[in-house]
Image: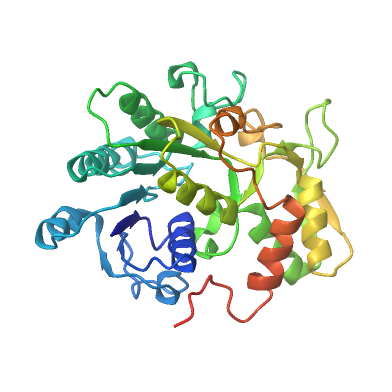
Amino acid sequence: MLIVTGANGFIGSALVWDLNQRGREDILCVDHISPKEEADRPLPYLKYQAFCKPEEVKNYLETHAEKVDAIFHMGACSSTTETNEDYLRENNTEYTKVMWNLAIQHGCPFIYASSAAIYGDGQHGFDDKTPTSTYTPLNLYGWSKHWFDEWASQQSLQPKSWYGLRFFNVYGPNEYHKQNMASVVFKAFLQIKDTGKLKLFKSHNSKYEDGKQLRDFVYVKDVTRWMIELFESNYAENGIYNMGYGVCRTWLELAENVFKSMNIPTNIEWIDIPENIRNQYQYFTEAKMNKWEDQGLSAPQWSLESGIKDYLSNYLMTDSRHMRTPS
């Protein structure tokens, strides 16, 4: 059996879908939101063995004597604007320790969601080989991930294998419930569909033209494939790994590809970055993927162009926008 937390969220549900494509349905899905609790959630379209809430995992495992092959811990509060430190520490840091210890108890690999938010303003780069203590996150969400990464690196008692994944700008199907935290690809699609144009931030940095700010965009299907690759590999070194494409692209390139996939002429309205976030706005992020490559793990398969085309053509512009496992 496999355990996937955050299974009714974005990356967790995409992972369940990918596992289904590979014939795995013996999955314990864990989430605060049950399959029928909220509309527009992805789990009803997927196959899995059982569902439980996070606080019920230990009891489920005690009453179901099954071998656990791996724990994929994707569940967390992912809001970068959350200001309740106690809530973030409990949900993102302390609960991850609970799942870490379960992986030790069951002798299985532990793969968990860290975050590129740990890298803060980027002044020290985006290198997963650099000690976590080097970095200063810009928000409490980033700190909640930082605290666990630091803790994990100091533990003498560890799971059979463990990997902390620092996700960069992930986009793709099943993110529809994320509201303000959804990707710009999804937000752009909705805005263009409604108005025929897209609002993008101007540049307030003389080194960058409008729309030429840079981000590392990675398609969710690459991310889930990589997670399964880590689980199945017997050679990857334990530790932190960046999850990005490894090559940054501009917001303008992203926008142009969304317009192209929608067969609508590019029409961008440039707006000022709000004063309250202007000083913290990042003009460049790019995942260093050398550590990943050094382990002999695979390269990304979805470019920005192909990822956006797949996302829009096969999901957003269809009547069934969720990832689905045929019944």
**In the displayed image of the protein, which residue is found farthest to the left?**
63
Residue 151 falls in which quadrant of the image? top left
User: Is residue 139 among the parts visible in the rendering?
Assistant: no
- Considering depth in this image, is 59 or 110 the residue closer to the camera? 110
For the N terminus, which image quadrant?
Answer: bottom left
Give how far across and how far down residue 186 sits, in percent: 64, 60
For the C terminus, which image quadrant?
Answer: bottom left
Relative horizontal placement of residue 127, taking residue 43 as reference (left or right): right
Relative horizontal placement of residue 154, taking residue 206 as reference (left or right): left
Residue 29 falls in which quadrant of the image? bottom left
Q: How is the image coloured?
A: rainbow
Give how far across and how far down residue 256 sits, in percent: 83, 55
**In the displayed image of the protein, which residue is found farthest to the right?**
265
Residue 85 falls in which quadrant of the image? top left
Question: Residue drawn at (35%, 48%), measured in percent from left and top?
Answer: 73
In the rendered view, would you say 251 is above or below 179?
A: above
Question: Residue drawn at (43%, 62%), measured in percent from left and top?
Answer: 16
Give how far across and how far down residue 229 sits, in percent: 49, 48
Give how far across and how far down residue 81 sits, in percent: 48, 42
User: Is residue 184 among the parts visible in the rendering?
Assistant: yes
**In the displayed image of the protein, which residue is found farthest to the front?**
234
In the rendered view, would you say 64 is above or below 181?
A: below
Question: Residue drawn at (59%, 51%), measured in percent from left and top?
Answer: 222
In the rendered view, would you say 165 is above or below 138?
A: below
- Considering depth in this image, is 132 or 293 the residue closer to the camera? 293
Relative horizontal placement of residue 250, taking residue 235 as reference (left or right): right
- Considering depth in this image, is 280 or 119 the residue closer to the camera? 119
Q: How many marks?
A: 0
